[in-house]
Image: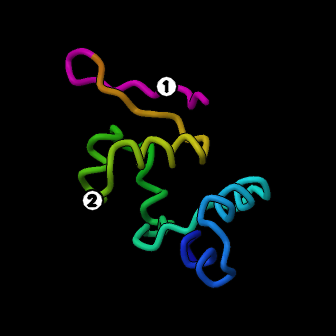
Amino acid sequence: MTDAEVAKKLVYLRNSVAMHRRKLRIPAHIPNQRAWTEAENALLGTMTDEKTAQVLNRSISGVSKHRLRLGIPCLRKTGAGRKAVLPASR
């Protein structure tokens, strides 16, 4: 349920609901957000974030953030088409 839906149901301001949710460390509900599958997670770090985003039809920033959350190192192209694995940084 979104913050707006909770606020309407409880007759509170949406900002009050959002603030209390953040205080309790409850993540926001985003209705159209697709959950990551195990198959998608398995692709992370096997190619660049740009290529992974294209293959999975997700944003580059979404792929990067999810990969970092999982502690998976990033794969970047280096000179002459070689690839280097860089450690995950936070």
The reply to whether the magenta stretch includes residue 12 is no
Judging from the image, what secondary structure is the residue with disc 2 in?
loop
In this view, the residue farthest toward the bottom is 9
Return the residue found at the far left: 80
- Going 48% across and 57% down the picture, which residue do you hit? 41
Instruction: Identify which residue is drawn at 40% across, 71% down.
Output: 32
| Amino acid type for the residue under numbered disc 1 | Leu
Residue 43 location (% of width, % of height): 41, 53
- Nearer to the camera, 90 or 71: 90
C-alpha gap between disc 1 and disc 2: 23 Å
The tag on residue 57 is 2
The location of residue 25, given as percent across then percent down, is: 75, 55
Residue 19, horizontal then vertical, whole percent: 69, 55
Answer whether residue 82 is magenta in the image. Answer: yes
- Magenta range is 79-90
Q: How is the image coloured?
A: rainbow
* Residue 71 x, y percent position in the rendering: 61, 41
Q: Earlier in the sequence, mark 1 or mark 2?
A: 2
- For image coordinates 68% across by 61% down, the residue present is 16
Label drawn at residue 86:
1
